[in-house]
Amino acid sequence: MKFGIISEAQVNRGMSYGVRLRESIKELVFAEEMGFDFVGTSEQHFMGGQWSISAPEVVLPVIADRTHTTQIRQMAISALSFNNPIRVAERVATMDILSKGRFSFATARSNNDKYMKGFGVNPETTREEFREHLEVVIRLLAADGPISFDGKFFSFKDVEISPKLESKTMPPIYVTATSPESHFLAGKLGLGLMTADTWLGWEFQQMLVDSYNKGLAEAEPIDNLYDVNPHITAFTFPAYCAESNEKSLSEARVAMQAMLKSVEGIAAGLAGNKAEGYQYWAKLHDNIVNHFDDLEYLNESSPMFMVGDPDWFIERAEKLETMGIDEVVLKIDGYGHSKTLKTIEMIGKYVIPHFKARKGSIPENAQMRAGIKDVGKFQL
């Protein structure tokens, strides 16, 4: 199991955008010290202070410059016309150079009604547009010279990007997916999966993983321009870890409810969308509304929340492993800088070593062995 962290620079009450963005960068850099395998941000628009990183291509080079070993992942690039695929390919190549080969990225079609309205996106064509956008990016990155493309949404002649990739192989590519159809398409294209918005429960999550694996079994990478990426990453929104389950839920309650309200708004905007692939959002919306005040239920019944003590985190990660998921990305954001750093440290010291440390390297506690009572657990 690999562990990643995502920050979307959620601005706390009374704080400026600038303060929060600078804090987010410090948190992601600290995650490398704590043993996280990858760090990154997503691309968000029109969300106010809830999710405020609208230009990840500006933020991620700063993180790459301040880290040395951890992978840098953009989660995800909106693969629609407002992000011209030629510009996207140029940015990916630049990040590959600046990160010294540590960059990977995910792509996604829009699952936010605000994006589609704000950028004038037609929801009826997002699946086709996403597929074509992705192909253009891959072909430009793989090309040794100028190429031409004549598609339904993008057309150009004799284009050659600069700079070019420094790495000999294509950076790992993922698809951030929420619908069963998008999960299958990710597998069919031989791309990695970042599975998200699984608020409908564990059986729904397993169905999505199965859909991806079904596509992966018959994978057809575009003209074999990249190696098949079989990794499955589970998003958790939000994640919080403290000394006990009770303390974790208490300290994360506001962030959990804020996330639910945001997702409820997105789901409400998409629930009435008649375009193919958006119908499940109505059920998702109802599930969130019906259980808004029962955070304990949602924390247990859905893979999306990950709030508890280190033992709870380990149990949850192992459950995800049994489903075929080999990476988990934790959204640790919106708690205040000091609590966010503490959560990162708690996971780095007590969760990640469980999966990576050599057997026997976590010893029995000497104080407990001596019969001392009330020995503290999960101390920082």
Image: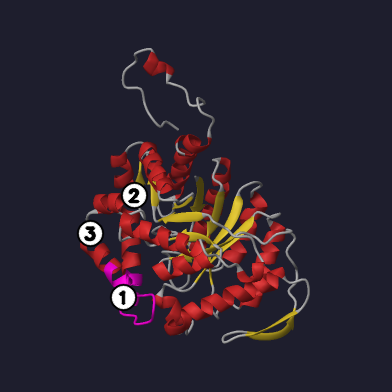
**Who comes first in sequence, dot 1 or dot 2?**
2
Q: Amino acid at mark 1?
A: Ala
Position of 194 with respect to 255 (left or right) is: right
In the rendered image, the vertical position of residue 189 relative to residue 296, given as above or below? below
Q: Amino acid at mark 3?
A: His
**Other residues around mark 2 within 10 Å, as few (<14) / some (14–19) / many (≥20):** many
Q: Nearer the viewer, mark 1 or mark 2?
A: 1
Q: Which residue is mark 2?
A: 252
Q: Which residue is mark 3?
A: 291
The residue depicted at 41 percent of the width and 42 percent of the height is: 318
Res. 43 in view: no
Residue 297 image offset from top left, x and y in percent: 24, 52
Q: Which residues are magenta?
A: 265-283
Residue 280 image offset from top left, x and y in percent: 32, 71
Secondary structure of the residue carrying numbered label 2: helix
In the rendered image, the vertical position of residue 346 relative to residue 303, given as above or below? above
The residue depicted at 74 percent of the width and 59 percent of the height is: 168
CA gap between label 2 and label 3 equals 16 Å
